[in-house]
Amino acid sequence: MKAAYEHVEFGGNCSVRVYHRRLPRIPFEWHHHPEYELTLTMNSHGKRYIGDSVATYGSDDLVLVPPDLPHTWASNRSIEPSLPQVAIVIWFDGEWDTDNPFNPWTAQDGEQLEGYLRGLDPKIILNRGRMLLIAAT
């Protein structure tokens, strides 16, 4: 199946966008985009599709998807049925170019983000290659 292109609008001089989704279910929406995507999924249990990887996920699932890698989540049930499923999505371009006056990211910011993510779960997998997958259970 071909992944749909998703345009992420940052607006103005922003280099990060945050999207807080509260849904009765998480639909299968196979897509890709040129930005990094950090997604925290809560009160949800289902399947996570990233590239050619398919895995079951549960509540408090944290994943960092690299640019242009097709991905989606799919869930028809909440862990706590009376509450919505939640996905907090953060998109960022990953360009640590300090010469760009519209991009405040630096290499030090990238190192701090990596340190923060490792602090969430010391067993976290960070691969500086093509696939960056983090799963906190």
Image (cartoon, helix red, strand yellow):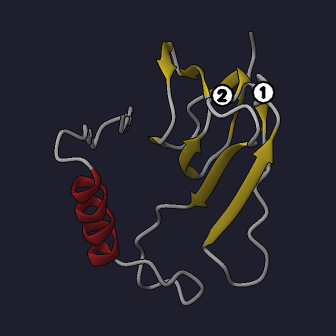
Q: Residue at x 53, y 47 (%)?
A: 40
* 105 shown above or below 2: below
Q: What element does badge 1 sit on?
A: loop
Residue 66 in percent (x, y) is at 48, 42
Viewport quadrant of the N terminus:
top right
Residue 64 in percent (x, y) is at 45, 44
Name the side, left or right, on which 36 lies relative to 129: right
* 120 shown above or below 1: below
Q: Residues within 10 Å of mark 1 (few under 14, many from 20)?
A: some
Quick check: marks 2 and 1 in contact, CB under 8 Å? yes
Residue 72 - label: 2
Marks 2 and 1, how far apart at CA: 6 Å
Q: Is residue 65 at least partly visible in the picture?
A: no
Residue 71 - label: none
Q: Nearer the viewer, residue 136 or 68?
A: 136
Residue 136 in percent (x, y) is at 36, 39
Q: Residue at x 40, y 71 (%)?
A: 96
Q: Residue at x 66, y 64 (%)?
A: 18
* 117 shown above or below 14: above
Residue 68 in percent (x, y) is at 59, 37
Residue 29 - label: 1
Name the side, left or right, on which 113 lies relative to 74: left
Q: Nearer the viewer, residue 105 or 76?
A: 76
* 27 shown above or below 89: above
Name the side, left or right, on which 21 lies relative to 70: right
Instruction: Using the rendered view, name the quadrant where residue 11 is placed.
Output: bottom right
Q: Nearer the viewer, residue 100 or 42?
A: 42
Q: Residue at x 69, y 29 (%)?
A: 78
Viewport quadrant of the C terminus:
top left
Q: Residues within 10 Å of mark 2 (few under 14, many from 20)?
A: some
Q: What element does badge 2 sit on?
A: strand
